[in-house]
Amino acid sequence: MFDTHVHAAPDVLDRIGDDTFVAESFCTADFDGFVLKGHYESTVGRARALARRFGLTVYGGLALNQHTGGVNPSAVAATLGAGGRVIWLPTADAHTQQAAGLPRLCDHEPVLARHSYAIPPVDPSREPDVDAVLRLVADHDAVLATGHLSGAECDWLVERAHRFGVRRLLLTHPSFTVPALDPEHVLDLVRAGAYAEITAYQLLHQPGCDPALLARVAEAAGERLVLSSDAGQPTSPLPAEALLRLIDTLAEEGLDRGWLEAAASDIPRQLFTPE
């Protein structure tokens, strides 16, 4: 198994354990590896250290939030140049996150401005910076993830990314509270070339989410489904356990277990592994 969405300490939010604790838990669960994500820090160096120490495949990347000034090509160039495998468009500081009242760094540090970020068509002025990021991601053959952008932004981004030659495009939990895409919208974006993620966090914590809805999203994603944990919170199981629980739950909805297991192993591994 290979989990593409994992959180660990150190972080600005409380986590279930530090990098070593989380990596050890994946070893115990006999996982091949994982992708380490931080909303406010490049995880490239941390991921490389874990890979060397534990013999796992561990990738890191960067989320384009307030600490980078949003969509910042220089920050992206530095991350990818250091070996990063994934760039997440704004997550915790996306305008959708602010509108939904979900946690942000400025909630913890009142001295910070409550600025949020968007891309076209919500904020057309960001087009040159987004284009530069797309060129960099394409040049490094990295993964571009949509973060918490809105449906309209995802539509624009998928088309734009292909224009610049981005081959690895992942819709970050599209049926989560942000951006709250329905299965039909997910299907349209998958047909346009994106992969679609479902996370155990949705099953465990998302208001109004149930297994039947996630099963419909999974069916829409088809062979481009990626299952991940998005775990690491003290209120969630260990990431490996959370991901296995998601597979069990979707299988109970009548979905093929072999396909679900591939969506948590072969498919994401192929998506993230450089050629």
Image (tube, grey):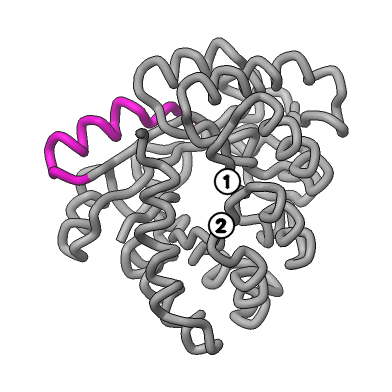
Q: Position of residue 83 (x, y in %)?
A: 35, 23
Q: Position of residue 172 (x, y in %)?
A: 60, 49
Q: Main secondary structure of the magenta part?
A: helix
Q: Is residue 77 left or right of residue 215?
A: left
Between residue 227 and residue 242, name the one nearer to us.
227
Q: Which residue is drawn at the image coordinates 23% and 49% (left, top)?
A: 23
Q: First in sequence: mark 1 or mark 2?
A: 1
Helix, strand or loop at disc 2? strand
Q: Is residue 146 left or right of residue 223?
A: right
Tell me the amino acid under the disc marked 1: Leu
Disc 2 crowd, CA 10 A, few/some/many (<14, 14-19, 20+): many
Helix, strand or loop at disc 1? strand
| Res 90 quadrant in image | top right
| Region of the chain picked out in magenta, as a range | 40-56
Contact between marks 1 and 2 (CB within 8 A): the answer is: yes
Q: Which mark is residue 35?
A: none
Tell me the amino acid under the disc marked 2: Glu
In this rendering, the answer to whether 271 lies above or below 77 is below
Residue at image mark 2: 197
In this rendering, the answer to whether 203 lies above or below 46 is below
Q: Is residue 128 left or right of residue 28?
A: right
Q: Is residue 189 left or right of residue 40?
A: right
Q: Position of residue 73 (x, y in %)?
A: 60, 14
Disc 1 crowd, CA 10 A, few/some/many (<14, 14-19, 20+): many
Between residue 189 and residue 197, name the one nearer to us.
189
Residue at image mark 1: 170
